Amino acid sequence: MNSSSRPNPAREPSYYVRANPDFVRDSDVFATARTSFAWLVTGPNPVSVDGREIAGLPPRPVPLDELGAVLLRRGCAQATRDAAWAYLIRRARAEGGTWTVACVGLALPVLLRAAAIVTRRFTGDTHDLNAAVLTGFLHELREVDLGRPAILARLYWAAYREGRLALHEAAGGPIPAGDLGFDSGPPPRPEGHPDLVLAAAVKAGVITAEEAGLISETRVGDVPLAEAAQARGLPYKTVQKSRIRAEHRLRAYLAEQHTGTAASAGRTRRIRRRNATRAEAAASRKVRAQVSPNDPQSRIASRGTRLPADRRARTHDATSGPAAHTRREARSCD
């Protein structure tokens, strides 16, 4: 661990020491992350970063809690935020352990914000949803491009998206109903749910992940645009214009998707009508066709009981000629 050069052994942590929100219990992953981060910054030798390697910080060892307070200031430049996060993530990738805990602890404000939106209307146990949010953050910590701006915003979006997927799965499955066994839970979210639509638009390249996160956070969620701009370290007008441009592209994309779906549905209906008409015409032709009893396929000639040859001959002789019209004489009783 790096040591601070300040001689005060009784220093108190100055970063994010508020109580856990309602959706975070004592055994929750966020509560554990908060406790672990507190161990890193407590005592006379807190874990520190080298301020000389991060533009905008004083050229001395800067304890993690002091760094967190600096990054949360309204006047902190985006370049300083990105430089600090790039420094932390490189050390987490190279050393793991302490520096991974440091990244989670410094990201707690945005992680708790993402978890608050995900669990806002969820009535079950939020532990799995919070764990999914943290999992999304940790996965993106290994993958995020450190050369692009707004590193923390992209980490936030990855965490939020993973939490939303977990919420979708939890809402679509059965939910325990006390002692009555398992009862059916809420129906699965439809494919047109805003977050799934945004994810499809990102996959199609219509909007970026950052733009999708901004739209989801401020439109689907309850985060004011001003607060979202502050979290990104950008002016309000810049974020507002970015959202307007992204929503314009998104509307065009959805309109095109709707037009294509309507045209496809129309073609399907026309094909079905044509097939039904052809089937009716074929059935009508079968009904109108003449059936010959001598046709081998009709099998009419094979129906009934065949008479023996001698009986057919006697019947033919008895019913032919003048004798056929002679009445039978009654026998005399005498």
Image (cartoon, helix red, strand yellow):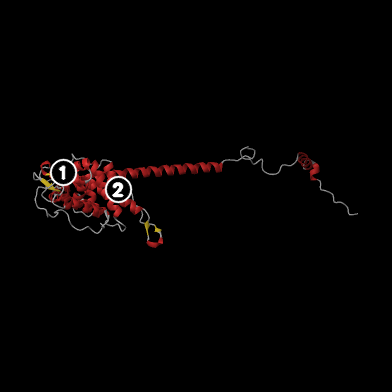
As measured in the structure, the alpha-carbon distance from the residue carrying label 2 to the one carrying label 1 is 29 Å
Q: Is residue 142 left or right of residue 293?
A: left
Going 35% across and 53% down the picture, which residue do you hit? 172
Q: Position of residue 59 (x, y in %)?
A: 8, 44
Q: Is disc 1 placed on a helix, strand or loop?
A: helix
Quadrant of the frame with the C terminus: bottom right
Using the rendered image of the protein, determine whether residue 194 is visible from the camera's viewpoint: no
Position of residue 150 in the picture relative to residue 200 (left or right): left
**Circle nearer the viewer, 2 or 1:** 1
The percent coordinates of residue 313 (x first, y second) are 77, 39
**Tag of residue 124:** none
In this view, the residue farthest toward the right is 334
Q: Is residue 315 left or right of residue 248?
A: right
Q: Amino acid at mark 2?
A: Leu
- Residue type at tag 1: Asp
Residue 167 in view: yes
Q: Is residue 276 depicted above or below 227 in this figure?
A: above
Image-quadrant location for residue 272: top left
Helix, strand or loop under label 2: helix
| Residue at figure coordinates x 33%, y 54% from the top left | 171
Checking the image for residue 82, the label placed there is 1
332, 54: nearer the viewer: 54
Q: How busy is the neighbourhood of tag 2: few (under 14 within 10 Å), some, or many (20 plus)?
A: some
Work out which quarter of the rendered image holds the N terminus and state it.
Answer: top left
Q: Which mark is residue 196?
A: 2
Q: Residue furthest bottom?
A: 179
